[in-house]
Image (cartoon, grey):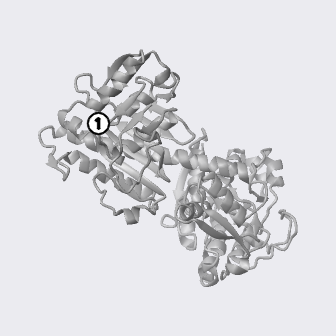
Amino acid sequence: MKNIAILGSEGQLGLSIQHMLGQYEHGCNTILLDKDELDITNGEAVNDFFKHHSTLDLLINCAAYTAVDKAEENADLAYQINAEGVKHLVENMPSSSVLIHISTDFVFDGQKDGAYVESDTTHPLGIYGKSKEEGEQALLASKKTTYILRTAWLYSPFGQNFMKTMQKLGSNRPSLNVVDDQFGCPTSSIALAEVIIQLIAKDRQWQKDNEGIYHVTNRGKASWAEFAAAIMKRSDLSCQVNPIPSEEYPTPAKRPKNSVLSSEKIERTLGIPMRSWEEELQAIIELQQQLMLDKIKSIAVEAGQAIMHIYDTMPNDIGVQKKSDDSPLTKADLASNTVIVAGLEKHFPDIPIISEENKNKPYDERKHWNTVWIVDPLDGTKEFIKRNGEFTVNIALVKDGKPILGVVYVPANETLYYGSQGHGAWKEDSQGNRSHLTNTKGHYSTLDQVTVVASRSHLSEAVEAFVEDLKRSGKGVTFLSAGSSLKFCLVAEGKADVYPRLAPTMEWDTAAAQAVCLEAGRRVLQHDTKEDLMYNREDMLNPWFIVE
């Protein structure tokens, strides 16, 4: 088993490496180090670290001062981290260790016409590039085994980066001005992490024989404006990107006009092709969606556990109160809401939240929210009080009025229903077994036998009329019933064919389950207009609708 340490473990590359290590049977003992665990500007601290880790096989240095503009004012700090810190590492590490160091396109001045190769002469324009160049020189002067991986324009689902900034701004602005005369290779830190994993996997002799400088970027070339426009398109954002010359966006530090790096050497050495930046961007946005869904599932389960703690341990003390609309509120509602709001604010701080338990945001504020969480921390409070288990935790992500991600969790039997736009709808049991939810039977109007979600003994007049219409058209009708948003889930998983909800509901009652139904090939249509049910409206009381 190899012993590896990752410096800068909380940055986007450090997190990407950890993510990729989790995808492989890598057989590594990993030490995660951020600046609080090891300050590389402190030579004594670095020396002490290596004394206690003399068997370290690989050190991956993702730690850097990367604030390009601030470096012009904080030159001493930039050099301490990017140059002196690197010297401390290479001077103190055991001779048997391998150092993989991350460098940058900023060591070049950007004046070359074509792509830069590893042997091109460096000529940085500013303090950041100069400090990184000095760090490289320290490694090249050493007799120890070192790798310098130059990369450019890094982005990922982790940390702060250009992609996430564009997504944030694109969610709230109709247009954006972006520089169009600086060119580079947009590169995901996941792609860079994959290369690092390949280097980690090699044996010690191979690592020694192949040390040196490598350029690692995705293939192709783009301007910042082209990159931004692609992010908007693939993130389904309507924000218009307006190309501008760099003179209209002055910065304290000069940027290379040409940051394009050739990755042919690393492709040849490892025998693996780098993907085009367009392909990589699509893959990263899909990964971003999957990671978001995984996090929401985790938050929903945690909220469900808070509910079940009260359900199981306080059956006679659930703290029933009455809300302004005379509906019940329990300690479980509040406990679940606390968990969900805290989780969403921690992991997705830029997205506002509408929850049943904190819903009093004026529409003048809400109408500007293109993207919003809509949450029901305990859907089916009456079922919770009755102790029949038919209550759920509902979390939905709504974009431009449409639910694009939804998680419905059933705490009593630990079942998850979830759907994410373009990724299908799924049911997952407590053991992690998944089943794909899809509409195989077709629209209820084409069926001879129709299963309706409703109560046989307590049909409202409107639902009675709906059922009578079905019978008059020659269809046999059977009934299923369930509490809370489980009614939607019965349709999503094909146990029922239609759910006429011809009675009042609120947006948080339906948003998450609608996302599941949409991905299962179902529709949730307003009863009168036959249009899709939409969200974050001025009146959050839903019109009557039919799930079909």
Judging depth in this view, the residue of 129 and 218 nearest the camera is 218
Q: Residue at x 75, y 79 (%)?
A: 125
Q: Residue at x 72, y 81 (%)?
A: 247
Q: Quadrant of the C terminus?
A: top left
Bin the neighbour count of mark 1 within 10 Å (Cα to Cα): few under 14, some 14-19, many 20 and up: many
Residue 431 visible, this angle: no
- Using residue 377 as the reference point, say whether residue 403 is left or right of it: right
Q: Quadrant of residue 153?
A: bottom right
Q: Is residue 201 above or below residue 192?
A: above
Could you say whether the residue bearing mark 1 is in a helix, strand or loop? loop
Judging depth in this view, the residue of 219 and 376 nearest the camera is 376
Count of labels in the image = 1
Q: Residue at x 40, y 31 (%)?
A: 489
Q: Is residue 436 above or below residue 115?
A: above
Give the percent coordinates (x, y) of residue 343. Answer: 38, 53
Q: Is residue 172 above or below residue 202?
A: below
- Using residue 13 as the reference point, say whether residue 526 is left or right of it: left
Residue at image mark 1 = 391
Give the percent coordinates (x, y) of residue 513. Answer: 41, 39
Q: Quadrant of the N terminus?
A: top right
